[in-house]
Image (cartoon, helix red, strand yellow):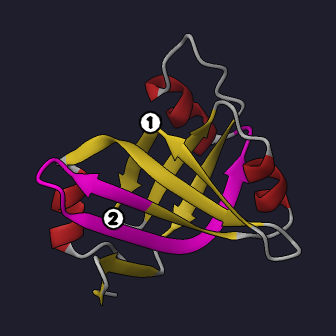
């Protein structure tokens, strides 16, 4: 199992509030959304709460991989790519419900497994 490089893990803790979460449809059409309800579950995975997914959930259910793009507060960019799993029950889903704001629906938890990591255009992993 691959892990976030330390520099990216530290950058995540200093990120701006909004990330970009991208998936791809079965026919290859990309889809990107802004997300604010995200958490680094551990050094191997990032969780995005499904509060208002539409195309994103369709893409995940069709087997899409995904990517997360984020900026730090000092405007450095990082991208994490990997396979996406989706949970509507169990430990990961319950964890997401604890940190996802109560005013939002939290339909499910999309988990990106760390497979590739970039700092700008430089591949770190």
- Residue 111, relative to residue 109: is it above or below? below
Specify whether 43 is left or right of 57: left
Residue 83 in percent (x, y) is at 62, 72
| Residue ID for mark 2 | 43
Q: Residues within 10 Å of mark 2 (few under 14, many from 20)?
A: some
Chief secondary structure of the magenta portion: strand
Residue at point 16% right, 59% down?
10
- Helix, strand or loop status at disc 1: loop
Q: Position of residue 96 (x, y in %)?
A: 53, 34
Q: Which residues are magenta?
A: 69-89
Q: Name the quadrant of the C terminus.
A: bottom left
Is residue 7 a member of the stretch shown in magenta?
A: no
Which element is circle 2 on?
loop
> Residue at 42% across / 70% down in the picture?
80
How far across and how far down the image is residue 92, in percent?
57, 44
In front: label 1 or label 2: 1
Q: Are marks 1 and 2 in contact (CB under 8 Å)?
A: no
Give the CA separation, mark 1 to mark 2. Answer: 19 Å
Residue 103's place in the image compared with 26, above or below, is above
| Image height of 63 relative to 55, above or below | below
Is 84 covered by the magenta stretch? yes
The residue closer to the viewer here, 58 or 77, is: 77
Residue 91 seen in this snapshot = no
Is 7 placed above or below 55 here?
A: below
């Amino acid at each position: 199992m691959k892990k976030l490089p330390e520099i990216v893990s530290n950058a995540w803790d200093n990120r701006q509030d909004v990330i970009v979460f991208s998936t791809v449809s079965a026919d290859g059409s990309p889809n990107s959304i802004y997300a604010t309800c995200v958490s680094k579950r551990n050094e191997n995975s990032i969780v995005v709460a499904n509060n208002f997914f539409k195309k994103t959930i369709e893409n995940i259910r069709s087997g899409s991989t995904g990517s997360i793009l984020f900026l730090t507060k000092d405007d450095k960019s990082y991208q994490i790519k990997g396979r996406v799993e989706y949970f509507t029950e169990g430990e990961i889903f319950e964890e997401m419900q604890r940190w996802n704001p109560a005013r939002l629906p939290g339909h499910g938890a999309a988990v990106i497994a760390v497979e590739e990591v970039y700092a700008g255009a430089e591949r770190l992993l």
